[in-house]
Image: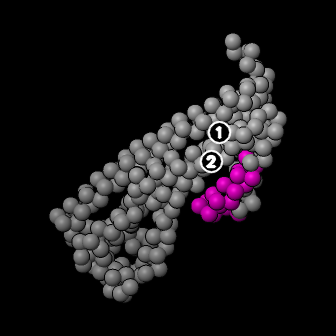
Amino acid sequence: MDERQHPFPELHQRDHHHRSIGTGGARAAVFGVSDGLVTNVSLILGMAGAHSPQSVVRLAGVAGMIAGAFSMAAGEYVSMRAQSELLERELALERREILRRPEGERRELVRIYENRGVEPEAARRLAEEMMRTPELALETHAREELGINPSALGSPVVASSSSFATFALGALLPLLPWLFTGGTVAIVASVVIGVVASLGVGIALAVFTGRPWWYSALRQLLISSVAAAVTFGIARAVGVSGIR
């Protein structure tokens, strides 16, 4: 990378690093698995706790998997589409200001760098370098003022597709035993699968949160366990006869 483009490359690298987790696909995938697992393990154990037949538990699990996957995908698409449209609007406004009043935008950059502790003369030279081309000027203003990277706004389609597929995967795991058996054997198998999958999801989440892997794994296991235990307990107390 040329020094004339980025006289302070360490600033550029640090800012870009702070925003690198927001592009959508991988984040949506990991959280999709987590949501699918927690949702369906709770639903399945809740139905099992109500003494429901194997066929009913299986039907509820399949319905929860399909409905939840579509709901997650739709919600992810709408939220990311709205966010992208908002950011694109802000970028369009910034682009217009750079073309209409470049000197004012240059002074704005100078103030930003000075507020960060850069010497006035160095801030002036840096701002001039950043304003040399409209593309670099837009990228710099977007990064410094809006905290975004214009080339990494995220894809609503990728995020929603990831959410759909991974929610379905997470929801399928505790359902698998009920496709082949029922009763206590299926309940125990769902619990074991849920525990192992929760630990795995927690470790994957640690990649995004920066937390120690053991902390994220135990936290995910605790959340899944509480949700499943409460649902199972309530369903066991009410039972199928209690809702007639």
Q: Can I make out residue 6 in this image?
A: yes
Q: Which residue is mark 1?
A: 40
Residue type indicated by callout 2: Gly
Q: Residue furthest front?
A: 180
Determine crowd level at label 1: few under 14, some 14-19, many 20+ residues with C-alpha closer than 10 A: many
- The reply to whether discs 2 and 1 touch (Cβ–Cβ < 8 Å) is yes
Instruction: Tell me which residue sits at (21%, 61%) in the image.
Output: 96
Residue 218 or residue 195, whichever sits in front: 195
Label 2 or label 1, whichever comes before in sequence order: 1
Q: Which residue is mark 2?
A: 170
Instruction: Tell me which residue sits at (45%, 49%) in the image.
Output: 160
Instruction: Tell me which residue sits at (69%, 15%) in the image.
Output: 243
Majority secondary structure of the magenta segment? helix
Residue 234 or residue 162, whichever sits in front: 162
- Side (left or right) of 36 relative to 214: left
Q: Residue furthest top?
A: 244
Instruction: Tell me which residue sits at (65%, 39%) in the image.
Output: 40
Q: Can I make out residue 234 in this image?
A: no
Residue type indicated by callout 1: Asn
- The local secondary structure at tag 2 comes to helix
Residue 60 or residue 107, whichever sits in front: 60
Magenta region, residue range = 194-212
The picture places residue 50, in percent across and down from the top left corner, at 75, 25
The residues tagged by marks 2 and 1 sit, at their Cα atoms, a distance apart of 8 Å
Q: Is residue 120 above or below residue 159?
A: below
